[in-house]
Amino acid sequence: MGEYADKMAAERQSQYPGLYDRRPVVRHGDGSIGPSKTRHPKTGYPEMRKQERMVVVERNRAARADRTPQQQLALLNKRLGKNVGAQRERARLHSLIESSSS
């Protein structure tokens, strides 16, 4: 993996401690048993099982629920750039901010 992929893997592991500690054990086509060799074609990361993905989904939902519209807007700006992308979400957040300030 490249430098960027390593950086992203380290960031993901710090965001979700314990999630990547246990790798699934499977029987491979050659008869060997070991960690899953399945990799995502674009990222190169091991495929996540459905249960693990649901854990991530729930954590993301909880984190989003804890953020105010202002914080969510700031996060969008940090991730995508100021006023870049997510136009409908930005419009929804601006209307929530305006309605709460009125």
Image (cartoon, grey):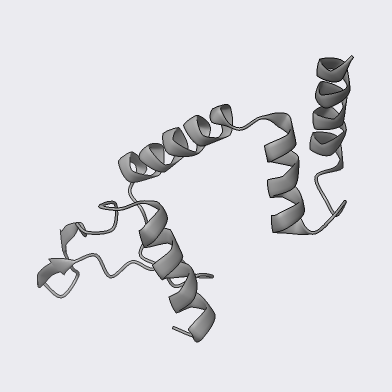
Figure quadrant of residue 20: bottom left
Whether residue 99 is situated above or below residue 75 in the rendered picture: above
**Which quarter of the picture shows residue 99?**
top right
Task: Indicate the position of residue 37 as horizontal and vertical percent values.
Answer: 28, 70
Q: Residue 24: x, y in percent?
A: 20, 57
* Of the pair 33 and 80, the residue shown nearer to us: 80
> As displayed, is residue 51 above or below residue 2?
above
Q: Quadrant of the N terminus?
A: bottom left
Q: Nearer the viewer, residue 80 or 26?
A: 80
Instruction: Say which residue appears at 36% left-offset and 51% top-offset.
Output: 16
Task: Indicate the position of residue 21 as horizontal and vertical percent values.
Answer: 22, 59
Left/right placement of residue 101 relative to residue 37 reads right
- Tell me if 4 is positioned left or right of 70 in this view: left
Seen at 19% across and 57% down, the residue is: 22
Quarter of the figure that contains the C terminus: top right
In depth, the one of 58 and 93 nearer the eye is: 93
